[in-house]
Amino acid sequence: MQQYIPDFNSWGKPKHECGICGIFGHEDAAKLTYFGLYALQHRGQESAGIVAGNGERIAIHKDMGLVPEVFSERILQRLSGHLAVGHVRYSTTGESNIINTQPFMVTHKGEPLVVAHNGNLVNSIDLRRHLEAKGSIFQTTMDSEIVLHLLARTMEMGIERAIKESFACIRGAYSLLLMTRDTMIAVRDPNGFRPLCLGRLDNGGWVVASETCALDLIEARYERDIEPGEVVVIDKDGPRSIFPWPPHRKSFCIFEHVYFARPDSDVFGINVYQTRKRMGEILAREAKIEADFVMPFPDSGNYAAIGYSQASGIPLEMGMIRNHYVGRTFIQPTQSMRDFSVRVKLNPVRHLLKDKRVIIVEDSIIRGTTGRSRIRSLRNVGAREIHMLVSCPPTAHACYYGIDFPSSSELIAATHSIEGIRDYLGLDSLSYLSLDGMVEATGLDRNSFCLACFDGKYPISPDKSFNKDALGGCGC
Ligand SMILES: O=P(O)(O)OC[C@H]1O[C@H](OP(=O)(O)OP(=O)(O)O)[C@H](O)[C@@H]1O
Ligand SMILES: NC(=O)CC[C@H](N)C(=O)O
Ligand code: SF4
């Protein structure tokens, strides 16, 4: 087994979920895409890439690392043209390596075909086996590549028919951008697991992005969300929308609101900050505790902590200081990286905590890495009572739709009771927000959401043999 030796150059690079951004109809399309990806960095911190074109020539640049590390002014100048598609990756199928970076581009019959994907396909093992039996040769171990193989087999029908036919075989979560030499196409799966929105630039050009915070940064106007099951084809005649598949039950990922999305974004039509704050307010209704102050584990816990504090009247303090040069930790690929990053990331304010009774408001407990390590640090600086409130229910079931907790054995709530988790984390008390309370905080109907990691009811039945290396790994 390979031993993990912290590499201070690569270790500090944080990880997260995928983000996509595309521009059509602006002479600086790649530069705007770069800024869009910058705003979406929290969704994917392993690699970044942009493909740009002017209707004739097409160029690509991608690499491992954060957006500003991957692109320079000189590189962006080379990515010229009015059309660009970009991606920041947090791997969910296939390793985190240069081969698996996105956007992924192939040439088919002399024509470029590009995909940038957020989500996870649940029948990728079967699809890949089937395609390989028919002679497909895969270059990567990502599920996203399958989309291009399916499209290539039907492209002669024209792109719209090809999409209709190809995606009919695909099951799972996909908010994605496709690009041909002169067209950008946004596709959102019929369940709508992952967000995707459409915006308008001042000059009349179009933007598609995972979250509205990307539109804000490039001063684009939010037009609307791309609907579940909708395909938006954008070319020189502007956007046209088609709905090639029968409607499915909506399954918006509620975890986007609990943890993933940026609080300044509107996701599924609702603001993330306000939803998180309401989660805290509802927690105050459901769990009443006496304490000297409330504190979050920053960043994702901040907003529910504000809500809890305001609703309960217990003052809010920032008892833990976050080092902003460390990214989000729960999606780091190895446990030793996660353990180390958590220590670097959060440090208690000794003088604030000594002899105090504190309530920590945390957005989620996944593996328990953050809680166990940081509660120990609070004890070390003399906190007298430590209670924890979590602004979602116990996360006890694997996600097969694009969040990297594919094995329930990694989830502490799958193997421990609440009392067992309390004991493992070293807390005086532990309470979770109820499922009803979490949904109530969104203001949307319960049937709009996927809640599978909380209630085990999967909107699309997963292939339980799936794991991140299901399509091949390096074996190291
Ligand atoms: O139980 P665990 O396995 O430790 O995972 C849960 C923790 O991970 C996340 O923080 P993260 O550092 O990823 O992001 P944040 O800075 O947005 O809070 C989340 O906010 C929890 O603090
Ligand atoms: N987090 C994601 O959306 C990942 C997209 C794709 N499944 C990949 O692994 O690259
Ligand atoms: S299982 Fe959980 S994390 Fe995965 S899509 Fe559903 S709500 Fe989101």
Image: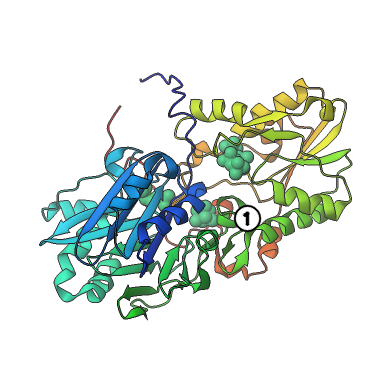
Three-letter residue code for mark 1: Pro
- Does residue 421 lie above or below 161 as drawn? above
Q: What residue do we see at 44% from left, 23% from top?
A: 7
Is 368 left, or right, of 313 in this rendering?
Answer: left
Q: What residue do we see at 23% from left, 72% from top?
A: 159
Position in image of residue 170 (x %, y %): 31, 63
Is 281 left, or right, of 456 in this rendering?
Answer: right
Dot 1: what SS? loop
Closer to us: 112 or 236: 236
Q: In the rendered image, is residue 413 in sight?
A: no
Position in image of residue 134 (x %, y %): 12, 56
Q: Quadrant of the N terminus?
A: top left
Q: Quadrant of the C terminus?
A: top left
- Does residue 2 lie above or below 26 as drawn? above
Q: In the rendered image, is residue 86 in sight?
A: yes
Is 76 left, or right, of 357 in this rendering?
Answer: left
Closer to us: 76 or 300: 76
Position in image of residue 416 (x %, y %): 62, 36
Which residue position is annotated with label 1? 263
Mark 1: C-beta under 8 Å from nearest atom of ligand 1:
no
Q: What residue do we see at 14% from left, 72% from top?
A: 156
Image quadrant in which you'd find residue 186: bottom left
Position in image of residue 376 (x %, y %): 71, 24
Q: What residue do we see at 60% from left, 27% from top?
A: 344
How dense is the environment of label 1, judged by Cα within 10 Å: few (below 14), some, or many (20 and up)? many
